[in-house]
Amino acid sequence: MRKFFIILIFFFIGCGSLSSYKEPSFKVIESKENISIREYGSYLIAYTEEKGTSDSNANPSFRKLFKYIQGENISKTTIPMTTPVIEKESQKIPMTVPVFEKETANFYRMEFVLPETMNLENAPKPTNPNVKLEEIKSKLVAVVVFSGFMGKEKIESKKKELSEYLKENNYKPVGEFYQARYNAPFTIPFLRRNEVLIEVKK
């Protein structure tokens, strides 16, 4: 049931794959087999961030963002779909009192990349307070591309593969790993394009 609403959306908008949509522009700095270093320019995203994991939040997060691009915004503007759909899970430590007491909680974040013509000034403002806009600055990103299912074990193995490449090639990770999906859930697994990414610096 978790993916049922997402599958219906892609069925009704008539897209078997997200790969036919535009994605953020980037320049490949170097590559080896399925791993590359990309230089991205700045771009705008719409995102939601909820306490919990992808198991509990993927469907409702997608629904909120899809409604935003379908006109749930102040100007009631329909925004073209782009790729990829980006997912992030992270640990946040909120400050408490006294200083030595901290509580760790899981947060799940989903992002839609908006068309490159949009920025914080001209993008339609969301009417749902849980949907926010953010400008992503230009950055260097390490990426490993793979097909098949994006299960937790597969993601962890790709993180390890990417970490080894960074160490061997003298790149330092910045922040945390995240995932990007380019296909509808019913796409044949071996035709899917999945990515695990992390921002890096030399």
Image (cartoon, rainbow, N blue to C red):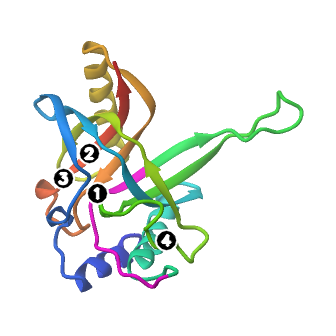
Q: Which residues are magenta?
A: 75-87
Asked whether 50 or 172 is in front, the reply is: 172
Q: Residues within 10 Å of mark 4 (few under 14, many from 20)?
A: some
Quadrant for the C terminus in the image: top left
Q: Secondary structure at mark 4?
A: helix
How far apart marks 4 and 1 lie (CA) works out to 17 Å
Name the residue carrying label 3.
193
Q: Are marks 2 and 1 in contact (CB under 8 Å)?
A: yes
Q: Residue at x 37, y 33 (%)?
A: 199
Q: Secondary structure at mark 1?
A: loop
Name the residue carrying label 2.
195
Q: Are marks 4 and 1 in contact (CB under 8 Å)?
A: no
How far apart marks 1 and 3 lie (CA) works out to 10 Å
Which callout, 4 or 3, points at the residue further toward the start of the chain?
A: 4
Q: Look at the picture and state if 9 lies above or below 56.
A: below
Asked whether 119 or 78 is in front, the reply is: 119
Q: Are marks 2 and 3 in contact (CB under 8 Å)?
A: yes
Whole-percent x and y of residue 156? 36, 36
Whole-percent x and y of residue 78? 36, 81
How far apart marks 2 and 1 lie (CA) works out to 9 Å
Name the residue carrying label 1.
84
Asked whether 174 or 185 is in front, the reply is: 174
How far apart marks 2 and 4 lie (CA) works out to 22 Å
Whole-percent x and y of residue 74? 52, 81
